[in-house]
Image (spheres, grey):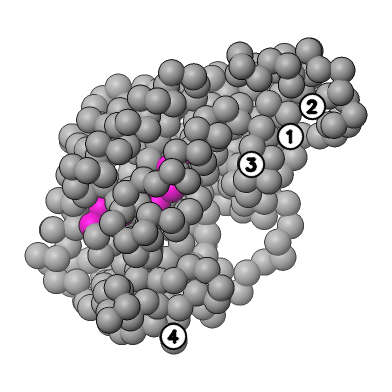
Amino acid sequence: MSILFSPLSIGPLRIQNRVVVLPMCQYVAQGDGLLRPWHIMHYGNLATSGAGLVIIEATGVQDTGRISPNDLGLYNSEQEARFTELLAGIRTFSPAKFGVQLSHAGRKASSQPFDNPNPVPVDAGGWLPSGPSPSTHNDRWPTPHELSRSDIESIVDSFVAAARRADRAGFDLIEIHGAHGYLVSSFLSPVANQRRDEYGGSLENRMRLATTIARAVRAVWPADKALGFRLNGTDWIEGGIVIDETVAVAKTLKGLGVDYISVSSGGNTRAQQLPPMVAGYQVSLAERVRKDAQITTLAAGLIVTPTQAEHIVASGQADLTGIGRAVLDDPRWGLHAQHALGDKTNYPRSHWRASPEAWPGFPMAHPLRA
């Protein structure tokens, strides 16, 4: 058996393989944060992709904490009920574990994500975003409201309330979004955070929001369920967060009961200098966190082929591989990867006719490639 398709424990949570479907925003919630038929189709499809874990897209802990007016939320009872129904249905046909990424978009909130993203004005259903300091990530955005201490406490309370809802809905895992320039990420980043109080300046202060949320969520999230945190390994700009700081944050979060770190990068400023978009361009960041923080780590960023994913986990660069756009392109990515790596495929029973064991046309449709 390949390493990629061997089981792994993420803290208390046992998953059947190391393929993780990353959270990918769909922007179809139509303004009320509720799951729609598209989400039912989308996540039901991903549940049969062959992945061991599927993480639902960035889900706002507050109405004004969503990336866009068309994002999902988990801040009211109707949203919770929809998630409960979704997960109950999926579990009638899929063994995949399901997580949700809890998020506050901060100064990048109230956006129109399609076709050259721009802020959504208040008179068009948007709202004034908020952040650690009155500075924008992008000159097209309005100056954000600088969060007060009471504002911060309210946001922490919202993460806790969303975690309780996620537990009742039946999620196996929570991932707190602390990357890509959203609220927690902007507090961590020196290019976004110019505060002079206990939330700004030193790394200890800049990580205070992250550690406060982690501590508060862990206190209400059941011990038999996993808690993760997504972090930027770098902001890709001089003066931004760097990998040594991310390692220090990861060590601190581990001590607070966080079970894994998902390592990404960028998004705090439009002036970032991104590297060439080559396969696995962020994996070295995950490798540093895994090695130096001694915590279970999820690698992401242009992981496309089965052999690439297998090499990442087999060589010890990361414990888990995050598959994003590749699984949108091929919703059976995990099943096809099993075949490519020489493992026995595990097709859903109703789709057995399409498996390589039962379909003579499989080699023609999928020439053995890895």
Locate residue 211, reporting x and y percent. Answer: 26, 50
Label of residue 137 in the image: none
Label 1 to label 2: alpha-carbon separation: 7 Å
In the displayed orientation, state which residue is furthest to the front: 37
Amino acid identity at mark 2: Ala
Label 3 to label 4: alpha-carbon separation: 32 Å
Residue at 47 percent across and 46 percent down: it is 38
Q: Counting other residues with Cα less than 10 Å from the Cα at mark 2, is it few (<14), some (14-19), or many (20 or more)?
A: some
Q: Which residue is mark 3?
A: 327
- Give left or right: position of 303 versus 40: right
Amino acid identity at mark 3: Val
Is 347 drawn above or below residue 79 in the view shown?
above
Q: Cβ–Cβ below 8 Å for labels 3 and 1?
A: no
Magenta-drawn stretch, dominant element (helix, strand or loop): strand
Is 362 drawn above or below residue 234 in the view shown?
above
Label of residue 140 in the image: 4
Label of residue 306 in the image: 1
**Secondary structure found at label 4:** loop
Residue at 9 percent across and 65 percent down: it is 150
Disc 4 versus disc 1: nearer the observer:
4
Q: Is residue 249 magenta?
A: no
* Residue range of the region highlighted in magenta in the rendering: 55-62
Q: Counting other residues with Cα less than 10 Å from the Cα at mark 4, is it few (<14), some (14-19), or many (20 or more)?
A: few
Q: Counting other residues with Cα less than 10 Å from the Cα at mark 3, is it few (<14), some (14-19), or many (20 or more)?
A: some
**Secondary structure found at label 1:** helix
Amino acid identity at mark 4: Arg
Residue at 34 percent across and 64 percent down: it is 69
Locate residue 269, reporting x and y percent. Answer: 47, 75
Label 4 to label 1: alpha-carbon separation: 40 Å
